[in-house]
Image (cartoon, rainbow, N blue to C red):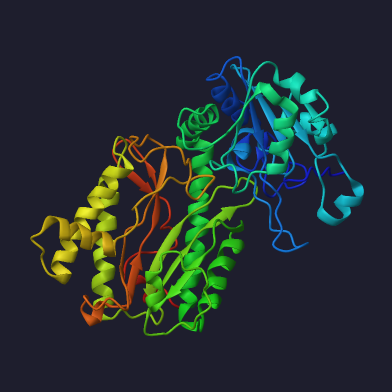
């Protein structure tokens, strides 16, 4: 009889987890324990308390698909809501888990739960307890003398289960070093999260394999969109083609809300309405990525191309400038540079292009101001279990080998900017790829199916 534990396992999902030693698809139990040992060794004599993300609803009874807090996922691999884990400081990697009881009546509606009686063996915990024991004295006994509450939710308000946070605070009282305000880098919880983010920053070979696959899946969806764009009368229909491609190649769904922005809407950086008609004579900007089933790793790709396959002269000039900047950056990015360095190179390259396209400016401050106006965002962010991964890692930290970043230059010429030549107004272009940082070069992992050659979108149409 197949035993279901509330998330994929070797016995219930062999198509996702052919390796018996995997705790989540692609990551073994041994790797999870090594992660816990590496973090725990930084905090001997303390207990680190982690609270799961909250299950949320979009209305009074309609559930939003649950996504586990990424730090909780990274350390424990437990993907259900309603959970608290206590990692013991030191290098043992030992942890204790509090989770929901098995509930046949509730499971008939919502699906299987692991249940505390199976959780210890399933997730290699020292012991597991029902959530009801949080305030009964069990948590105090497990923690010992001192505890720190930690979450990927650096503001302690966006996705963490605040009801469980309250229970932990009441149960531990003076033993708990509270998160308090997130504005100080010397807060105990912040130090723990920073150490965990340092671990997450450098990907293991197992993680890199998953991230490469996420890049392939994401690029396949983009290719499907490119091939079908001419047949899509609206942004929503093109969005469906892209996201269906993700699913076809094995994704759980999207990593973030997809952007499908036709024409001048591409100049709105976080446009997600995706509800306008696609004009065949305009460009469309598609920023979308796939999230892998079970493991949670994902990709983040942007492609911009003409709906009908043919660039106009001004559109091609803007596109080529963005592509040139991206290629320059990718060719030079390597271990030891910082995200600030990477952005500075792109910024200066765009300044030169804008001098050529809009006229040279002798005033240095005005030149910088113009570049910031038309290239208003950073060129890179870290990527992994989160789209904007490892939030406590500064952009001034040298990039280590096997970290993963995006490279996403863009130019955005608003339709109502009368200072621009009319032929540039309303053109927005971004090109984004994901790269693995090497000692001397970067490995591009998102072009297997989705080309960036300006001739390719039209050539690849069915």
Q: Work out whether residue 340 or residue 143 is closer to the camera in this orientation and state it.
A: 143
Identity of the residue drawn at 45% across and 62% down:
449
Question: Is 236 displayed left or right of 120 in the figure?
Answer: left
Percent position of residue 385, x then y:
54, 45
Percent position of residue 55, x then y:
71, 50
**In which quadrant is the N terminus drawn?**
top right
Question: Is 280 displayed left or right of 89 in the figure?
Answer: left
Taking the view exactly as shown, the residue that stands out farthest to the right is 105
Percent position of residue 172, x then y:
71, 25
Question: Above or below — where is 154 with respect to 243?
Answer: above
Residue 94 seen in the current view: no
Q: Quadrant of residue 246?
A: bottom right
Identity of the residue drawn at 55% across and 25% down:
39
Residue 393 seen in the current view: yes
Question: Above or below — where is 356 with respect to 29?
Answer: below
Question: Is 431 displayed left or right of 65 in the figure?
Answer: left
Identity of the residue drawn at 50% across and 50% down:
387
Question: Above or below — where is 109 with respect to 39?
Answer: below
Percent position of residue 232, x then y:
51, 81
Taking the view exactly as shown, the residue that stands out farthest to the left is 362
Count of marks, rendered view: 0
């Amino acid at each position: 009889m197949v035993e279901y534990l509330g998330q994929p396992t070797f016995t219930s999902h062999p198509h996702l987890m052919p390796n018996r030693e995997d705790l989540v698809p692609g990551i073994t139990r041994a790797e999870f324990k090594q992660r816990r040992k590496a973090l725990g060794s930084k905090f001997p004599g303390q207990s680190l308390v982690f609270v799961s993300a909250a299950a949320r609803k979009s209305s009074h009874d309609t559930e939003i698909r649950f996504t586990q807090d990424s730090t909780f996922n990274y350390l424990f691999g437990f993907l259900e809501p309603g959970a608290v884990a206590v990692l013991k400081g030191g290098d043992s990697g030992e942890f204790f888990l509090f989770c929901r009881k098995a509930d046949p009546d509730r499971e008939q509606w919502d699906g299987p739960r692991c249940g505390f009686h199976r959780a210890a063996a399933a997730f290699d915990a020292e012991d597991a307890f029902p959530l009801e024991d949080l305030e009964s004295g069990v948590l105090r006994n497990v923690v010992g003398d001192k505890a720190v509450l930690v979450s990927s939710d650096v503001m302690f308000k966006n996705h963490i289960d605040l009801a469980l946070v309250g229970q932990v605070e009441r149960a531990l009282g003076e033993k708990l070093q509270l998160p308090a305000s997130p504005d100080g880098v010397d807060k105990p919880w912040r130090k723990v999260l920073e150490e965990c983010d340092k671990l997450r920053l450098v990907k293991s070979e197992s993680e890199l394999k998953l991230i490469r696959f996420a890049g392939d899946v994401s690029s396949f969806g983009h290719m499907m969109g490119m091939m079908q764009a001419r047949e899509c009368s609206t942004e929503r229909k093109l969005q469906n083609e892209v996201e269906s491609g993700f699913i076809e190649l094995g994704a759980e769904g999207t990593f973030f809300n997809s952007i499908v922005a036709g024409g001048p809407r591409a100049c709105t950086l976080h446009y997600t309405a995706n509800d306008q008609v696609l004009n065949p004579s305009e460009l469309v900007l598609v920023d979308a990525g796939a999230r892998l089933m079970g493991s949670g790793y994902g990709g983040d790709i942007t492609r911009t191309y003409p709906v009908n396959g043919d660039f106009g002269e001004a559109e091609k000039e803007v596109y080529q400038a963005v592509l040139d900047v991206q290629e320059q950056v990718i060719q030079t990015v390597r271990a030891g540079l910082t995200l600030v360095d990477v952005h500075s190179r792109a910024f200066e390259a765009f300044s030169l292009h804008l001098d050529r396209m809009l006229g040279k400016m002798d005033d240095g401050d005005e030149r910088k101001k113009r570049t910031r106006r038309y290239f208003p965002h950073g060129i890179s962010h870290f990527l992994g279990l989160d789209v904007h991964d490892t939030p406590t890692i500064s952009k001034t930290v040298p990039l280590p080998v096997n970290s993963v970043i995006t490279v996403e230059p863009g130019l955005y010429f608003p339709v109502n900017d009368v200072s621009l030549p009319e032929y540039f107004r309303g053109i927005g272009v971004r090109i984004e790829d994901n790269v693995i940082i090497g000692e001397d070069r970067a490995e591009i992992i998102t072009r297997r199916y989705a080309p960036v050659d300006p001739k390719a979108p039209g050539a690849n149409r069915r």
